[in-house]
Structures are given as structure tokens and as C-alpha cells.
Image: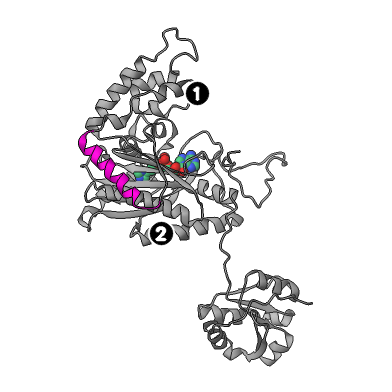
Amino acid sequence: MTPKISKPQSTDVPRERSKKPKFIFQAPKGMHDLLPLDQPWWERIRRVLTDVAEFYNFTRIDTPILEDAALFERGVGAGTDIVEKEMYVLKTKGGDRLALRPEFTASIIRAYLEHGMSRLPQPTKLYYFGPVFRHENPQAGRYRQFYQAGFEIVGGESDPVYDAQVILTTCRFIEELKIKNLTVQVNTIGCKVCRQNYKRKLQLYYRSKISSSGKKGEGICKDCERRIETNPLRLLDCKTPSCQPIKEQAPSILDHLCTTCNNHFKQVLEFLDEIPLAYTLNPRLVRGLDYYNRTVFEVFAEGFDVALAGGGRYDYLGEMIGSRVIPAVGSSLGIERLIEVMKTVQIPLPRHKGKVFFVHIGELARKKSLPIIEEFRKAEIDIQEALGKDSLRAQLKVANDKHSPIALIFGQREAFEESIIVRDMRTGVQESVPIVKIVEEVKRRLSMKVDATPLKVAPKK
Ligand code: HAM
């Protein structure tokens, strides 16, 4: 069976909501808390994002969550679902019309222009991570507040190598999260000129498919009838079953490209052929934002029916928001979807290895523990403790679970003698060291390589 993305919820915390009679406040519909038990997933995503972005020379940008609503109306397109139906717009006390950003790309171009980034060496490669807002019908994999990460290459030439590089970076990021078997669907939607010609062909074709009887199930659906005039490319996005055979027979954009767009697309595919990446050509892929030209793409994980990432070239966006044509290409990824896939296919998170584990025995030792631990923090040595746990067994179990190579054992006798027992968890050997020398001793041991198989500690009371 095809695994589908399930509803957002922590896998670890039971949901109490349905049992309790009434809550005064709940998170708004389609929005969710990121609970402590889920934070390791988010932390993992942020780390991998930074590593991959820096490897491919992208630098981080953060833009405001609120923007002038007109930026998206002009950039994403007034007739798109995102702007027409899904944008959260508010009026400030000062009378400004602001929108909670429904995506990042328009903000990136706004910031690029506002800060004169074209004066930097071109192209400018930017990446980002943060929440976006769309008033959609919440369902599996579709929320009203969700997080996006993204990569944008802005400025320079409209060079196909950048289209391929954005696709490559997007896929590497997903693969670094250990999600395997990706498929990239790629298409081109041409430029202003060849697309106009194609749209006319599409309109002609679809007009001939309007049912003359007006009966439901005959001809195209009512939404498609409307789209013929308002947004003909979106006809190719229709999911209504009765429209599918009609869509299959529709004229293909690939037969209507101008020479420049045709060459551009050919080169993108040639670059993709050079890298180990599974892509398929989908001439029906159009995407739901108005700013695209030429290359568009979406990335899927095997067995999941929602896109993990989407993007494309958007050379006209600068012009659409009142400036000039700025060659640009980029992609965004849905973070909740990535995490749901990682959880569904049970990708383990890398375990954080604490270097040193501090074990206390008895109340006197516990009282004197904090300043010792502070010395390690000052020396920037990763030290963990379980000061809330009393039994030696429970503490050594935590040390074991954390795979700490060294345990420091501090009991009543050690507190009196101002010493501490250093136990090498890999060899089981332990010795007493004066407290004043403990940090140096641990540093020395951590820099040593011990050639022994890890010892399973069976803690005793
Ligand atoms: P988008 O396809 O609208 O593109 O969104 C990108 C990704 O965000 C999707 O592939 C999906 O993973 C995630 N996503 C979208 N809507 C939702 C939702 N309601 N709930 C959860 N996840 C969602 C853009 O936003 C463009 N700005 C991409 C781009 C960047 N194009 C050029 N540069």
C-alpha cells in the first residue's frame, strides 16, 4: 500500500485532547506546537541544512515574517490559490496592509533589490529556514503554518547550470537526511513569448471539451471551465477524475517552446544526466505560482504522494514586483513533510555522544557537584549529568545510553578527600584523581585513542 503522510502530531506524546471535555485555548487549526520530544528531528534538519548549504556556497538570509501584501499579490500572482484563497492579510493600526508570508521567494527578491545585492559577486546564493502561512484546508501533509527551507540562486546569467545546481542541492539535502529513492519531476513552461502561444492552443483545445449538455461528468469540470479564461496553465493541474483523459490528450508545452527555451531545457537535462539523480519528464507539471519561467520541478520520495520540494526558474519576478528582470532559480522544501517521511520509514536520528558523564553518590556529593560540572563547561568539554537521579544504577544506565567514553564518579568519600573517580567506560578501568587536576586529566584522556571494544557496563547498586 502507498504510505501516506499522516496528520501532524508527536509520535511520543499521547494526544489528550479528545479525552478532556473542554480546552479553553488550543493551537489554531492547522498550526501546531513543536514539542520537546520532537526537537531532535528539527535540530537534525537545521544541522544538515547548514552543512549542505555551506558546502554548495549558499549563505543564510532571514526576512520578516510579515511583508507588504502587495509583494505577494504582484509576485506570486493575484489569481493564484495562494494569494486569492490562502493568504493571511491584516491591517495594522498605522493602516498598512501586511501579509503573513505564504512563501519566501518574493521576499528574497525584495531583499535582494532593497539591499543592492546585485553589487556583490553574482550570482548571489542564499538559503533560508522559517515558518510560512497558508490558509489551506488542513489535512495530511498540508498545514496552515508550516516550515520551509530553501535555496535561491539570484543574479548573474540565466544559465541552465544553476537550474541543475538547485535541483542537485535540494536532492542532496533530502538524501543527507537519509531519505532514499527520490524522484525529480522536471518540466519547462517556456518564456513570456512561447508560453502565450501555448496558452492559446490550450484554450482552444479545452474550449472544445466544454460539455454542451452541461451535465455533470460530461466534458471538463466547472473549475476547468473557469480556468480556461483565468489561468489556462492550471488546467494541467486539475485532479478531477473525469478531466484526466482530457488532460492526457492536451497539447504539450514541449512542442511549443521557442528555440532559446528549448536549448535552455535541453542543457538543464544534460547537466542532470551527468549526476546520479533519477528524474522524469512531466510535461503536465506547471506549479501553482505565477512567477515561473522555463524550468519547473518537484521532488518526491518513493511511496509518498505529496511533494517534498518544489521550485524552478523565476527570471521575471524582479520585474513583476516593479524592478527589472533578474535571472533567478530556486527551490523550497516542506520541513514537516520531511520529518513525517523520516518517521514513517523509521530513519534513526544520530545519537548525541556525551563525552563525559558525571555520576554522584549521596547528598553531600550532589551538593558539591555543580561547581565541578561548571569547570568542565568553562573548559568547553561536553559533560552530562543526571543530578535528579539518585541511584548509581540509574545514572550509569544513562551514561551507557549516551555512549559516554568517560564517567566521573563522585561519592561521599571523594567529596571529603576532594578527589573524583575517573572510569573509562570503554575499558572499565578506573582511578582516583584530585579534583584540581580532573579537567586536565579528562582532556588528556579524550585526546588518547583507546583500542578496546566498548565494555557493556552492568551497573550494580
Ligand atoms: P511550493 O511548492 O508552494 O513552492 O512549496 C514548497 C514546498 O513546501 C512543497 O513542496 C511542500 O513540501 C511544502 N508545502 C507547501 N504547502 C504546504 C502545506 N500547506 N503544508 C505543509 N507543507 C507544504 C514554493 O513555496 C516556492 N517558493 C518554491 C520556490 C523557491 N520556487 C523558487 N524558489
Type of amino acid under label 2: Val
Front residue of 283/447: it is 283
> Which stretch is magenta?
258-276
> Pointers 2 and 1 in contact (CB under 8 A)?
no
- Graded by Cα atoms within 10 Å as few (under 14), some (14 to 19) or many (20 or more), the crowding at tag 1 reads few
Query: Which secondary structure is most common in the magenta stretch?
Result: helix
Q: Is residue 275 magenta?
A: yes
Residue 241 image label: 1
Q: Is residue 142 magenta?
A: no
Residue 52 image label: 2
Residue 424, given in percent of the width and then of the height, sits at 64, 82
Q: CA distance from mark 2 to mark 1?
A: 40 Å
Q: How many marks?
A: 2
- Callout 2 secondary element: helix
Residue 95, given in percent of the width and then of the height, sits at 35, 38
Q: Residue at x 24, y 33 (%)?
A: 192
Type of amino acid under label 1: Pro
Q: Residue at x 52, y 83 (%)?
A: 447
Front residue of 3/398: it is 3
Is 122 rendered above or below residue 283?
A: below
- Ligand 1 closer than 8 Å to the CB at disc 2? no
Is 235 rendered above or below residue 439?
A: above
Residue 170, given in percent of the width and then of the height, sits at 40, 51
